[in-house]
Amino acid sequence: MEEEDELPEQESGSESADQPEPDCDAFVVQEGRNEPRFSGLRGFVMGSIPSTYTNKLPKNNWKARVHVQTGPENYKPTNKTVAHKTPIVVEQQVLRHHGWGNYTGVLLVREVGGTDYFYIDKRNFVATPYWTCGVNKASSRGWPFIAEVVSNAKGLDSDGDWVSVKKGTQVLCSSSSRTTHLGRKRGFVACETYRMWKLGYGGTSVEYNPEDLRVIY
């Protein structure tokens, strides 16, 4: 990432990029009546949910936008970006309360082992590398990941009909793919399945048995 101008000066840490084993049950910084505490946490950049209307899976350009301060309390996104999964430390938080459990704002972060500071939207911070925690855990919060179908699978389409999906198919799973009532009853996970690229179509939502999927990104 390019260096950002006029960021607050901070003392850089000396920690390494090594991370402890992830706690796959400790995903979220809790929000409620009191302001959530991000400052001092180590975690990762979580790229914004990619568009499902593209002609390829977004592995190489899955990023979060860097923000810059434009006024005493205003922060706006720039064209600069930071890669999904970048390990970071939160140095400061600037949050605004909008009612019970609803906070927006930015975090001043530093890449682990680095000296550059930059702001990201708090929604682009995650405390746990959920992509290492398996399909059920990763999907339980609706956070985006790419999975591979590990067997010739039968999934459910939005009409509740079975559809066949070939082994090795890569799919995008996120909160933008809603599981139907029938899928929830079966414990299925909804993912965008890119079957129509050559025709110029976007993703088609298909619900899968988690045992038929493996997180790859």
Image: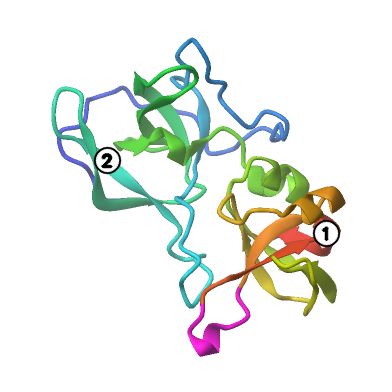
On the question of residue 13 being in view, the answer is no
State if disc 1 and disc 2 touch (CB < 8 Å): no
Label 1 crowd (10 A; few <14 / some 14-19 / many >=20): some
Using a 10 Å C-alpha cutoff, classify the residue at mark 2 as few (fewer than 14 neighbours), some (14 to 19) or many (20 or more): many
Q: Nearer the viewer, residue 134 or 111?
A: 134
Span highlighted in magenta in the image: 194-201
Residue drawn at the location 50% of the way across and 24% of the way down: 41
Amino acid type for the residue under numbered disc 2: His
Most prominent secondary structure in the magenta stretch? loop
Residue that carries the numbered disc 2 in the rendered image? 67
Per the image, the residue denoted by label 1 is 209
Q: Is residue 203 on the magenta stretch?
A: no
Closest to the observer, 95 or 2: 95
Helix, strand or loop at label 2? It is strand
Q: Nearer the viewer, residue 159 or 136?
A: 159
Label 1 secondary element: loop
What residue is at 83 percent from the left and 64 percent from the top?
212
Q: Check if residue 196 falls in the magenta segment.
A: yes
Please state the horizontal and vertical placement of residue 200, each as a whole percent of the image: 48, 84
Q: Residue at x 53, y 39 (%)?
A: 17
Instruction: State the image coordinates of residue 186 (x, y, percent, origin top left).
Output: 86, 53
Hey, which quadrant is residue 195 in on the image?
Answer: bottom right
